[in-house]
Image: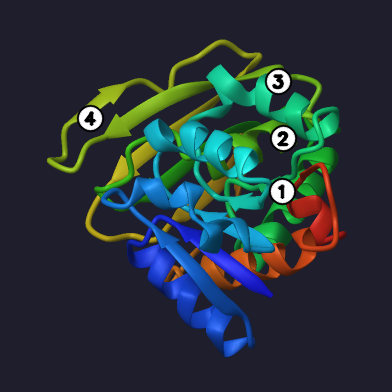
Amino acid sequence: MKIALIGYGKMGKMIEQIALSRGHEIVCKIDIDNQQDFESEAFKSADVAIEFTNPQAAYGNYMRTFAAGVKLVSGSTGWLEQHGEEVKRLCTTGGKTLFWSSNFSVGVAIFSAVNRYLAKIMNKFPEYDVRMEETHHIHKLDAPSGTAITLAEGILGELDRKDKWVMGTLQAPDGTVTGTEECAANELPVSSIRRDEVPGIHSITYNSEADQITITHDAHSRKGFALGAVLAAEYTATHEGFLGINDLFQF
């Protein structure tokens, strides 16, 4: 399979290593200094492009990739609120293909399924309140993380007593804490911590007067995310539309 990389930082380089080890070919690498290569024949020859950049660049990268007629896999977050409906429409009725996930880790996919199942159980036990905390490296621009939002939406889909998530506290890299976990009974607080080079930790806690239940996913490195992205590219090469992690991993 011919793969183009959009974003050639730590994640892009790790994706390249895994793609090559699985017998794929990297035909184009696009970063901040060679944006003109979106129009190159090498980019257009790709079966799938894999994009990991940032919230500010993602939407423009999507439009350039679609214009080149290339299918896309992306793990960039922070663009959905402003451009989500447009991008989904382009994929469902406009003939474009995007496989998007806030997190490509196989472990996170399993964790998400456990999260939804636990929320379904806890729907019968209103004495437990729920909150979430996510921790990432200091370079991450958006908070809460896209993965945390996806997990929160999974809880909201199963827990009748909660109908919206809200931003809880935010601990900045310098240790400064803003915000609060105090919220209305129908709200799920999601707090964020930015420290060191943490790949990603997500914890969901159900607390009652009697006891506390916590489930946690703790990523040891970015390798799991990179492998998942390549697996998604392999899936996307033979599928179309607006695709997601539940299409790839059907638990």
Asked which secondary structure carries label 1, the reply is helix
Task: Residue 115: give its label.
Answer: 1
Amino acid type at circle 2 is Ile
Q: How many marks?
A: 4
Q: Earlier in the sequence, mark 1 or mark 3?
A: 1
Category of crowding for the residue at label 1, using alpha-carbon neighbours closer than 10 angstroms: few (below 14), some (14–19), many (at least 20): many
Taking the image as shown, residue 199 lies to the left or right of residue 245, namely left
Q: Earlier in the sequence, mark 2 or mark 3?
A: 2
Residue 138 versus residue 206: which sits nearer the camera? 138
Q: Residue at left 84%, top 32%?
A: 92
Q: Residue at left 44%, top 34%?
A: 144
Where residue 243 sits: x, y (%)?
A: 78, 46
Amino acid type at circle 1 is Asn
Task: Residue 155: give its label.
Answer: 2
Residue 44, compared with residue 228, is above or below; it is above
User: Image quarter for residue 207?
Assistant: top right
Where residue 220 sits: x, y (%)?
A: 43, 72
What's the distance in space between the residues labelled 2 and 1, CA to CA?
7 Å
Residues at circles 2 and 3 in contact by the CB criterion of under 8 Å: yes
Residue with the mark numbered 4 = 177
Taking the image as shown, residue 191 lies to the left or right of residue 240, namely left
Residue with the mark numbered 3 = 162
Asked whether the viewer can see residue 123, the reply is: no
Residues at circles 3 and 4 in contact by the CB criterion of under 8 Å: no
Q: Earlier in the sequence, mark 3 or mark 4?
A: 3
User: Image quarter for residue 41?
Assistant: bottom right
Residue 77, compared with residue 2, is above or below; it is above
